[in-house]
């Protein structure tokens, strides 16, 4: 049986921490940055733990 291929879109969007959690980049940092406060931009720029409901599907796409 052939090997399972990693979903190329998923590997660009998610990363796995040492403890096995999936991290993602928070939405909202692509455009209209001049109207957003610096505090808000710093918060949006930080990685975020993937929601519990999305983990199963993301792990399947990553081949985990």
Image (cartoon, rainbow, N blue to C red):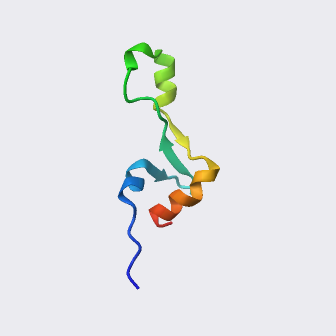
> Is residue 12 or residue 16 the one in the foreground?
12
Number of marks in picture: 0
Q: Residue at x 47, y 34 (%)?
A: 27
Whether residue 19 can be seen here = no
Vertically, is 45 above or below 40?
below
Q: In which quarter of the image is residue 30?
A: top left
Q: In which quarter of the image is residue 62?
A: bottom left
Residue 26, percent across and down?
49, 36
> Is residue 23 or residue 5 the one in the foreground?
5
Residue 17, percent across and down?
52, 52
Vertically, is 21 above or below 33?
below
Vertically, is 5 above or below 59?
below
> Is residue 43 or residue 8 the one in the foreground?
8
Relative side of 60 to 9, left or right: right
Q: Which residue is drawn at 51% across and 18% down?
A: 39
Q: Residue at x 38, y 20 (%)?
A: 32
| Residue extending farthest right | 52
Task: Tell me the quadrant of the picture where the N terminus can be found.
Answer: bottom left
> Is residue 32 or residue 42 the one in the foreground?
32
Whether residue 16 can be seen here = yes
Residue 18, percent across and down?
53, 55
Vertically, is 41 above or below 56?
above
Q: Which residue is drawn at 42% across and 14% down?
A: 35
Residue 24, percent across and down?
49, 44
């Amino acid at each position: 049986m052939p090997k399972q291929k990693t979903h190329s879109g998923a590997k660009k969007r998610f990363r796995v921490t040492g403890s096995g959690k999936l991290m993602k980049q928070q939405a909202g940092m692509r455009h209209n940055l001049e109207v957003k406060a610096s505090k808000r931009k710093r918060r949006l720029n930080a990685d975020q733990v993937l929601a519990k409901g999305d983990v199963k599907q993301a792990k399947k796409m990553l081949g985990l």
